[in-house]
Amino acid sequence: MNHISFTNGDAMPVLGLGTWKSQPGEIGAAIRQAVEIGYRHIDCAWIYGNEPEIGAALHELISEGVVKREDLWITSKLWNDRHAAEDVRGAIETSLQNLQLNYLDLYLVHWPVCLRKGIYLPTKPDDYFTLEEQPLAGTWKAMEDLAEAGLARHIGVSNFSKKKLVDLLPQVKIRPEINQIELHPYLQQKELVDFCHHSKIGTTAYSPLGSRDRPERLKAEAEPVLLEDPTVIAIAKSLGVSVAQVLLSWSIHRGSSVIPKSTNPGRMKENLEAASLSLSTHDMDAIGKLDRHRRYISGETWTLHGSPHTLDSLWDE
């Protein structure tokens, strides 16, 4: 498996297992099966609500000698209500306790959105802080402290636009090493991906298959279905592989890591095999023409109820 390399010599497998929407009672078994299949990169977040079960599975796997801790790459994320500098360390310590780990390989600021402590999803205007009230630079300084304390070997961001990165970079001591963003052929974000790679910030693609199983409140009527795209289907048939494998390979060919979610052993194995799939220049060019700038995770969750955010200000588009 190829890796994303870091300046200190660490290497993150380009294909990992996403855990958003993996249900309690399922995710523990899925983690065990994934590691036994060959996964070494697991993407988590406190807000997903399943870190304790993931941690129990990881503890068993490591204790039984199935895998060594140093062979795993474990990511988690800082939720929006813990952006205050004094709350950041407590947030990672909670995830570490849940995951039964002494350190994370990567810790990300989940969204450039600030909520009052204890507010997980906003319901009224007072639930928010503006970015002027709670600047991202202050949160980032606390993230740097985590790296210096050894609680996170690497730190990064998620859902950050080019503008937010441009604004943040002059204020950092440790550069964000990853920006985890929605990426797939219908949302290719070429300018942002190019900027990140030019700035030595890696990219990780979430919702790479179109996130058909996301909550109904996040879906639109008659939305395009990525897995049913005729161009991608034709390429998959020509190569004798699945549509999902083509979509995952496309992200890897662009230099991004990718974190498809599954709890099905057969699909997990199939997804992992996409890391070794080769797409031709013709295939990549054909997929490159599919961009619709279509977000499946629109960000509207953060623009409701008198929010200081709009979709324009969230994505800076």
Image (cartoon, rainbow, N blue to C red):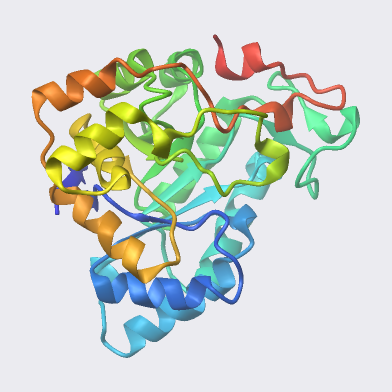
| Residue 113 seen in render | yes
Residue at point 43%, 60% (across, down): 262
Residue at point 49%, 35% (across, down): 158
Residue 259 vertical position relative to residue 220 in the rendered view, above or below:
below
Q: Quadrant of residue 178?
A: top left
Residue at point 78%, 19% (across, down): 308
Residue 83 percent location from the top left of the image: 65, 39
Residue 317 vertical position relative to residue 133 in the rendered view, above or below:
above
Q: State left or right for residue 165 relative to residue 62.
A: right
Residue 11 percent location from the top left of the image: 20, 51
Q: How many labels does the image show?
A: 0
Quadrant containing the N terminus is: bottom left
| Residue 199 seen in render | no
Residue 89 percent location from the top left of the image: 58, 53
Quadrant containing the C terminus is: top right
Q: State left or right for residue 256 relative to residue 130.
A: left
Q: Quadrant of residue 60?
A: bottom left
- Front-most of residues 129 and 269: 269
Residue at point 65%, 35% (across, down): 219
Q: State left or right for residue 270 relative to residue 155.
A: left
Residue 235 percent location from the top left of the image: 20, 34
Q: Quadrant of residue 234?
A: top left
Residue 43 vertical position relative to residue 295 in the rendered view, above or below:
below
- Front-most of residues 316 and 205: 205
